[in-house]
Image: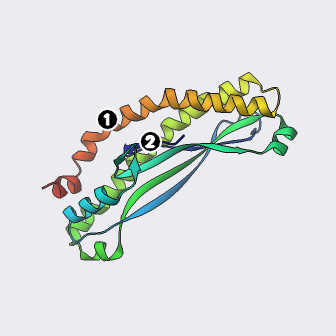
C-alpha cells in the first residue's frame, strides 16, 4: 500500500523494529531525492516540471513525499527485546534545475527559481511533522498494548499503520489545501503561468 500526497505530498516508510529504550517515541529518517528539470525560461522549467515530475495519487506534483508501510520484521531482535516501535523513513522528492537550465536563466529568473525550490522544500517538511505526530500516537498505543510475541506485535503494528493512514491522511490533505494559495502566489509560479 503506497500513500502519497501532492502539491507537495507526504509520506513515510514504516518498518517494524525492536523497541527503543523506555520513553523513546517513533523515530524517523529523511532522504531528499531531486528530479531533474530542464528549460531555458521559467515557463519551460514549469512545463518540464509538471510534465516529468513525480506522481502522487495519479497527479504530478512540484514535490512529493511517499508513505509506504514496511515489510520487514527482525525476528531475532524481536525475540531479544519482545517489543516493537515505529520507524518512519521519509522520501521527499524535489525539483532541481539541470546545470544547463540553471545557467541559461537570467540572474532574476534564477533567483525566482531558487526561491520557488526553497518554498517547495519548506512546504514538504511540515508534512513530515504531521506524520510524526500521528506516528508518536501510534507508538504510544503500540507500547500500551504490549504484544504477547513477535507475531502479535507484527499484527498490531500493521493494524496501527492502517489506523494512522486513516487518521492522518485528512490532516495532510487539509495542509495541502491551506498551502495552495501560498504556492500559487510564488513569483516563479505567477511568472511561469503567463
Q: Is label 2 in a helix, a strand or a loop?
A: helix
Q: Is residue 123 above or below residue 105?
A: above
* Residue 1 falls left or right of residue 49: right
146, above or below 181, in the image: above
Check disc 2 and report the residue beneath it: 126
Q: Position of residue 187 (x, y in %)?
A: 20, 54
From the image, which quarter does the N terminus lie in? top right
Residue 155 drawn at (x, y percent): 71, 30
Identify the image quadrant of the C terminus: bottom left
Residue 65 vs residue 183, the one in the foreground: 65
Instruction: Tell me residue 131's x, y (percent).
Output: 52, 37
Find residue 81 and report its image quarter: top right
Quadrant of residue 144 within the rendered picture: top right
View extreme (left): residue: 194
Q: Residue furthest top?
A: 145
Mark 1 closeness class: few <14, some 14–19, many ≥20 residues within 10 Å: few
| Secondary structure beneath label 1 | helix
Amino acid at each position: 500500500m503506497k500513500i502519497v500526497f501532492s502539491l507537495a505530498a507526504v509520506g513515510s516508510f514504516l518498518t517494524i523494529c525492536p523497541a527503543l529504550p523506555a520513553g523513546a517515541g517513533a523515530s524517523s529518517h529523511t532522504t531528499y531525492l531531486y528530479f531533474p528539470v530542464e528549460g531555458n525560461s521559467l515557463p519551460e522549467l514549469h512545463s518540464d516540471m509538471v510534465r516529468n515530475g513525480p506522481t502522487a495519487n495519479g497527479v504530478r506534483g512540484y514535490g512529493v513525499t511517499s508513505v509506504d508501510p514496511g515489510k520487514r520484521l527482525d525476528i531475532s531482535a524481536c525475540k531479544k527485546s519482545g517489543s516493537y516501535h515505529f520507524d518512519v523513513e521519509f522520501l521527499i522528492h524535489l525539483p532541481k534545475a539541470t546545470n544547463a537550465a540553471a545557467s541559461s536563466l537570467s540572474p532574476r529568473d534564477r533567483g525566482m527559481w531558487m526561491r520557488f525550490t526553497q518554498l517547495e522544500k519548506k512546504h514538504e517538511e511540515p508534512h513530515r511533522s504531521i506524520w510524526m505526530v500521528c506516528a508518536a500516537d501510534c507508538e504510544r498505543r503500540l507500547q500500551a498494548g504490549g504484544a504477547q510475541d513477535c507475531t502479535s506485535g507484527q499484527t498490531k503494528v500493521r493494524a496501527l499503520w492502517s489506523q494512522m493512514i486513516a487518521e492522518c491522511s485528512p490532516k495532510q490533505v487539509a495542509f495541502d489545501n491551506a498551502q495552495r494559495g501560498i504556492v500559487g502566489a510564488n513569483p516563479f509560479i505567477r511568472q511561469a503561468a503567463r
